[in-house]
Image: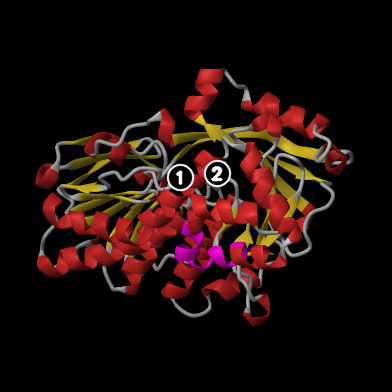
Amino acid sequence: MIKAEDIVIIGAGPAGVSTSLFLAKAGIPHTLIEKSQFPRDKTCGDALSGKVVYVLKQLGEGYVERLQNKPDAFLPSWGVKFVAPNGKHIDIPFKSDLSKETHAPGFISKRIDFDAQFFSWINPNYTKVHLNTALESIEGNGNNMVLKLNTAGKSWEIKSPKLVIGAEGDRSIVAKNLSDIRKENDHYCAGIRAYYEGVEGLHQQGFIELHFLPEMLPGYFWIFPLPNGQANVGAGMLSSTVSKKRINLKEDMLRAIQNNPHIKERFKHAKPIGKIQGWGLPLGSKIRTISGENFLLTGDAASLIDPFTGEGIGNALYSGMLAARHIESCIRENRFDAAFNKAYDKAFYDRQWDELKLSHTMQKLVKFPWLFNFVVNKAHKNKALRETISCMFEDLDLRAKLRNPLFYLRLLIND
């Protein structure tokens, strides 16, 4: 018989709550530990990709509609706008035929809203929740593991859990204590974001914007529209580049807003809301071991952020779903050891590694601004090419063309 203390999730962000919701759906009792109280903010790009929508559909009917019915917190997003270093842009819908869609393929929402909404769906019949509770340390490992916790100054323990799920983000104590995952600047991105009001020219269908500005390469600048006429504005760059070139990402972003000819006019009446916030993005640009003896890692704790777009919520929810499914197998077979848990790693990377590897390749292409200019110029003139690129969002085999040099050769010799 499984008790709630046998399965312990550390962190009630997207990855942890996703794991919890799918465990509850399977009727598995568990404990959820969260150091904060909701609502609480989290520095993020705030984009909810099509993968988020997919996972919500796997939870059951009505979850996507609940977001759709809250326009003040969740803005529907139908596509992405790519802006080349030369200022030319192409608008690419997330779906090739939007007329067939009953709801948006994605959403944009401040994390303070999304996380609170997502957490509100926790099922109390199967979930023992401890808010304002910090994991202070982990002693021992395997069957002898002891979780040292603190709730409002009161220390307590959970002894010998069968599985601990690390879902507490980039600075995961579970990952630090139980796994070999460490920060690597070549697979880690520095990110900053600020909220603005009054940014002009936001897309009417909530397209997110990725700008590859010459002054910020090999990083990128983004503008993501938000509900109520606001926007999430930010920039990201590999930590290895930031360190090597001694880049001040905040100064570069503000300089681009003030001086870039394709950006500054859109910000002439814009005002920042609050401060510019920074955070780290552990990228899924290499295969890591994300499980071990009596533990699993999910979301940012497992370093699963898309290397090209910087989007992490989709893989956080997806890894939580797979973790819950694996936990079902653990309980059924009464196996919680490292060898058995490798099936979780395999399940995730079998489904997601091709996509992550492709995104890593596209991240590298940012080093060649002429190539971005070339492709965007061609797509700007060629409807068939725009439709092909749009289909790449749905079909991974088509998207893999971007790694093939013949794709660019054909563009070069064809109008």
Looking at the picture, does residue 380 appear above or below residue 135?
below
Report the Cα–Cα distance between label 1 and label 2.
Answer: 25 Å
Which residue type does callout 2 highlight?
Answer: Lys
Residue 75 appears anywhere in the view: no
Residue 284 is situated, as x and y percent measured from the top left of the image, at 40, 45
- Residues rendered magenta in the picture: 389-400
Badge 2 is on which residue? 42
Label 1 crowding class (10 Å Cα cut-off): few <14, some 14-19, many 20+? many
In which quadrant is the N terminus drawn? bottom left
Residue 292 is situated, as x and y percent measured from the top left of the image, at 19, 47
Looking at the picture, does residue 13 appear above or below residue 183?
below
Badge 1 is on which residue? 360
User: Which residue is depicted at the point 26% across and 68% down?
Assistant: 28
In which quadrant is the C terminus drawn? bottom right
Looking at the picture, does residue 369 appear above or below residue 411?
above
Q: Residue 345 lies in what quarter of the image? A: bottom left
The answer to whether 152 appears left or right of 197 in the picture is: left
Secondary-structure class at tag 2: loop
